[in-house]
Image (tube, rainbow, N blue to C red):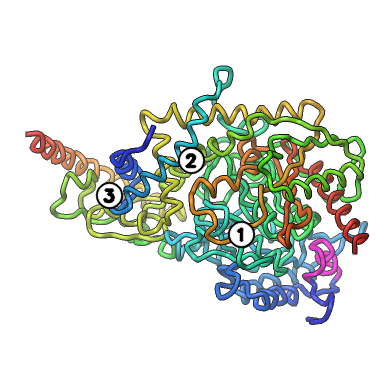
Amino acid sequence: MNEGNGGSPLELDAATLANMVAGNEVDPIDVTREAFRLARDHRLGPEGLNAVLWSDQRDSVNEARALHSRLAEGLGRRADDGEPELLLAGVPYLAKDNIATLTLKTTCGSKILADYVSPYEATVVQRLRAAGAVLVGKTNMDEFAMGSSTEHSAWRPTLNPVDQSRVPGGSSGGSAAAVAAGMVRIALGSETGGSVRQPAAFCGIVGVKPTYGRVSRYGLVAFASSLDQVGVFGRTVNDAAVALEAIAGHDPLDSTSAIGQPVPHYREAAREALGGVVIGRPKEYFPDSLDARVRERCDRALEHLEGAGAVVREVSLPHTELAIPVYYIVAPAEASSNLARFDGVRYGLRADPGRGTRGMYEATRSLGFGPEVTRRILLGTYVLSAGYYDAYYKRAQEVRSLIADDFAKVFNSGVHLLFTPTTPTPAFTFGAKKDPYEMYMSDIFTATANLAGVPAMSVPIGDVDGLPVGGQLIAPHFAERDMFRAAYALERALSAAAEVGR
Amino acid sequence: MPVTEDDLRRVAALARLGVPDERVAELTAQLSGILDHMEVLSRVDTSRTTAAIGVSAGGTPLRVDLGPPLPLRHARERFAPRVRDNFFVVPRLATHEDPEQSTSFDDGENVVDESVLDEDKQRHQADALGESQRESTEKAEKSNERVDEAKAKGAE
């Protein structure tokens, strides 16, 4: 592979690369090897940024070889429009370590699953393979996706490639760091309260949380089932759009996967102007305490959206400030139930001090779970326990309805999309958030979309002292295409402005 | 509602989490601190709202609960801590169990059935499970009696 400027196929966006692979101009085996070379060059393994936990070059090359045969059997370019038959032919990708894969381990960043290899495969992994993508590794994460910095991984934190003294965000920090470092164009993450959008913002890439039910969760290790959704990272809006197109749609193996919701071609929104689009600016997401430079980047992004034809309107989502208290009751409650399955019997670690099954459960779980997971299981068990259920859990579910109603009211009042900062600040330094609740507040602008089940994405909108800042677009249920339309327009305008400024 | 150390121990027992004594105070304080932030919810007027059940547009899609379990692509030995004859093995009960420490009703080494690989094994396992369930029910009853006895003694 070429070493010079513009020589790497991974500098091409995913769709262009797929087209070249489909047209036999680039060999998918070479592309796969190139991804591994980049991983070594950028030190993405445990000795460096610690973004990629598990990978096997030989297996990945074999996958690429199998793809080679499929291409040779006539799955190259389509005759009518010259587009690739396989949307992601030869495109390497990474998956978060809580997504089940058959050959690589699935540890969820936890000691309790330290050597776990799943006996089945996630639907999203099967769909990406069907689309021609090649899995090149599993990425680091906060243990069981509980965290906003990857500092809670049992396998040590991931470093932010933009500034290694800072966290990459979390919980899907490994995926975000690897895409930002340039090893791959796309990666899978998972979202419960912002675990794709927040690291995307911290690393300066695009991160999408689809509508609840848009993407199958079969093979995603459950954290909080009323909130969890698989998400995608892309270096650009188009990378993310292609990846989402490949994995979205109904799956009979996931009972929460939506029926009767066709998957639009998100990429077709790429060139559309924003005439007639009304974008709300919710005042609760721009509090006085917001970092002034983050606010300035957001205001500039809104000007760009207006420049593309959108109308910006001030709106209110009055229950926003309650999102974190609600989220940190609902999510731990569901987690305490979902994580009950890790008991040393059917999979993973077993510690048996010889005091019966009860003793085995307790020893296994206290040895296997890290401090944050322990804290959340205790919190979740407490808010569900007799005497506290009504005061905490039931009350939180009621307030959750009010938060969902806020979105419904705004979207029913002629507003098509919302624009907000993704996070209150750029990436923070390691160890900066020692108090658990202070860490929880990192999710303040992202958890609302999970609670309401609506889609949202983070797009890079500039930087502050060299640290990336993300802007968030939020759309009504299943309106991802409109969300991408605005994201494309924003990305285009920002890159044009950067050209002028150069 | 501040969390007490007794609350924390009770919740840890419910969650089957062994929390060492030296961590109880710290975790109690953290839980209390976190729950203080949740008090704001008690001041919200929720008289005109109902608890959210799901957030899917159009409700939860349902399907008929049919069909065999999906085949596993790796043998259980590859991912389970202890397997014998395709069953998951759970530990043998300690000979002198302290009822204060444990309320487990198992006695001897039990096996727990899980998903199956093919029909033959399914039949085989169904037979085996029937037997082991009968056994463990009898054992649980005996064990219950012992726990009751122990409680009665403790109360004296």
Q: Which residue is mark 3?
A: A358
Q: Position of residue A423 (x, y in %)?
A: 67, 48
| Residue A183 in sight in this render | yes
**Are dots 1 and 3 in contact, CB under 8 Å?**
no
Q: Please, which residue is most extreme toward the left here?
A: B156
Residue in the image at 37% along x and 61% along y: B81
Residue in front for this viewpoint, B34 or B60: B34
Is A328 within the magenta? no
Left or right, B1 with reference to A65: left
Residue at 75% over, 48% down: A471
Q: What is the crowding at mark 1: few (fewer than 14 residues within 10 Å), some, or many (at least 20)?
A: many
* Residue drawn at x 70%, y 53% as measured from the top left: A207
Nearest to N terminus: mark 1 or mark 2:
1
Kind of residue at disc 2: Glu
Q: Nearer the viewer, residue A203 or A64?
A: A203
Which secondary structure, mark 3?
helix
Q: Position of residue B100 (x, y in %)?
A: 18, 44
Q: CA distance from mark 2 to mark 3?
A: 22 Å
Mark 1, residue position = A173
Chain letter of the residue carrying label 1: A
- Considering the numbered disc 1 on the image, is that residue within a helix, a strand or a loop? helix
**Residue A232 falls in which quadrant of the image?**
bottom right
**Residue receiving disc 2:** A334
**Which span is picked out in magenta?**
A10-23
Residue A374 horizontal side relative to residue B13, left or right: right
In the rendered view, tell whether residue B73 sits above or below residue A451. Answer: below
What's the residue at 79%, 68% (across, down)?
A71
Give yes or no for residue A15 being in the magenta stretch. Answer: yes
Where, by quadrant of the figure, is residue B3 drawn?
Answer: top left
